[in-house]
Image (cartoon, helix red, strand yellow):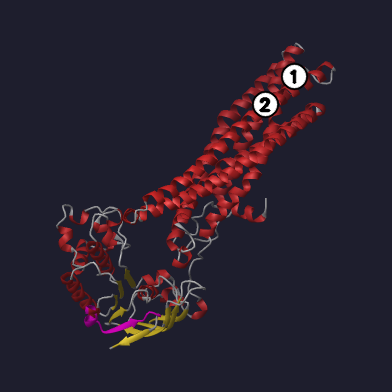
Amino acid sequence: MNRRLFSLLFKVPGEAISTGTAPHDRFFGRRSLLRYFTALLWDSAAFPLAQIFMSLAEKRLVNAVEFENPSYMKEVVFYCVLVFLLTFFLNSIAEYQKEQQTALFMARLKRRFAEKLMLLTPEDREGFKNGDLIARMNQDMDSIGELYSWSLHRFFLGVFYGGGSILLMLLLCWQLAFIILILAVLEILCLGRLSGRIRELGEKIQADRAKGTGLFLSLLNCLKSVRMLSLRSVMYQKYSGIHREIARSRAKQEDRIALMNAVSELTGSVNLLGALAAGCVLYFYGIVDLGTVMAFLTVQDGISYMFSNLKDFFSSLNRYAVSLERIYDILDLLAPERIPQEEGCSRRSFPQTISRIECRHLNFRYGPDTEPVLRDVSFTAESGDIVAITGPSGAGKSTLGRLLAGLRSPTGGEILYDGLAASLLSREAVSRFTAYVPQFPHLFHMSIRENILGGAAPMEQTTTDILRAARLADAASFIESREDGYSSILLENGRNLSGGQKQRIALARAFLSDKSVLILDESTSALDEASEDRILDTLRREAAKGKIIFLISHKERLNASCSFVLRLDENGRLSRLP
């Protein structure tokens, strides 16, 4: 087992993640880690000990008959009581504790994985496809759960069972132990060639399933386009082709599993007959008694079991290592974001409101090999300003909006919030004073009221606040006309609303948050002019309260309502219009 895998197997995060998880809330705390390994070892040792004691009971039982000595029956009863206690008490309690700790571990692991996904920066998120992330959350998590719940148990079970059986055999008769050991090695060599191919097919099936999941998700997101472009047959062929390949791999895998089971049964029978024959020969030569032969037949499976389990465990380590690394690729991707203390800035100095935004020679490109989207953009906006950002499609308007909202980091230049560099602030800190409303906002499968609340704590916002925000966004009339009003449940992503209604709910969410900076990215594109004018009146009133508002739009009519206009050309350069 290499050092990297060992560290992943028992990795206990040394600190909480930046979403506020308490420092003591780790996958395995010291106590739970101790409980897990104690339960794992006892659960793994109970069955081997029971088998060894049972073999000794059988030995004494046969000896009692063979030598006509009833005193051996006391030992038989003693061993049977030990077997009962090990099987029905120790094993059950240990297995319950092991499964309980494993379930807690997996729940915490999945929760932290989900928290980290929510912290992914757009730059990091671009490196992962949806299908791949779902495969990590499902197949890789299942693989890790299997490791802690079953595979480690089988590993120690094999060690205890095989080691105990070998020790007992050597104590009883080393000659017969040597013969059984040779038979077990031959059995493992026969099965080893088959199991390797089965593992390869399993890895191929897992990879194909991830591709199928990714394709299915893309289909869900573009069903209308598939129908309009008559791509149904093409997409069907792609999807069915993946699943035909999975079916072929599964059929091959099942064929080899069936063959391996048949070979396993055959070699097991040969081992048993070989051990019986060797025992009979040694018995007739007076080397062992009949009870010893019976004890050997009871525990001879332990050696085969040990070799088989250890081989399977170590051959599966690569698969477990891949799953662990794929999960920790996400968990280790983001360290908790902190303000550098040497810069003279602490968490207490995080601004809750700001009155000035300055961009100095801002540049941005999406990748090292791509053309810059923004070039040398410089401007200053202050409290009360309504700033229009216009330009042709692809000029970088939305990119500039995301930079101002802290959703992306510039690749050159800097953004200053009240003189504090954005590079010194975490995205969470920037979100405290900025509200960003995209052209196509996402709404959740919950009530309209909950969608307007967004991330605000419900107890901090009264019904009056929600109604006021809806009126400011010109959303109150259509919400109140619905049968359940603000309690109306929206379908996923607001599929039971029009585009304009979704935009107005998103605007209400922004107004309710009462941030000092509002960034509206084509957020009124689906509204008619009357609704748009009412929202512009609202924005002017909000600006009069000292807020900074950015309007990203293609509509020239909005420029008249703005303090000044920033026009981006097709090269991402800025010209300022008075």
Viewer-proximal residue among 524 and 215? 215
- Under circle 1, the secondary element is helix
Query: Can you tell which quarter of the image residue 282 is in?
Result: top right
**Circle on res. 385:** none
The three-letter amino acid code for the residue at tag 2 is: Leu
Q: Residues within 10 Å of mark 2 (few under 14, many from 20)?
A: few
**Circle on res. 291:** 1
Q: Nearer the viewer, mark 1 or mark 2?
A: 2
Viewer-proximal residue among 501 and 353? 501
Q: Which residue is mark 2?
A: 266
Please tell me whether residue 561 belongs to the stretch shown in magenta. yes
Query: Can you tell which quarter of the image residue 350 is in?
Result: bottom left
Residue 104 spot, x, y in % from top left: 49, 47
Highlighted range, magenta? 557-571
Looking at marks 1 and 2 on the same chain, the residue that comes earlier in the sequence is marked by 2
Give the residue at x 66% y 31%: 49
Residue 333 spot, x, y in % from top left: 52, 63
Query: Can you tell which quarter of the image residue 149 is in?
Result: top right
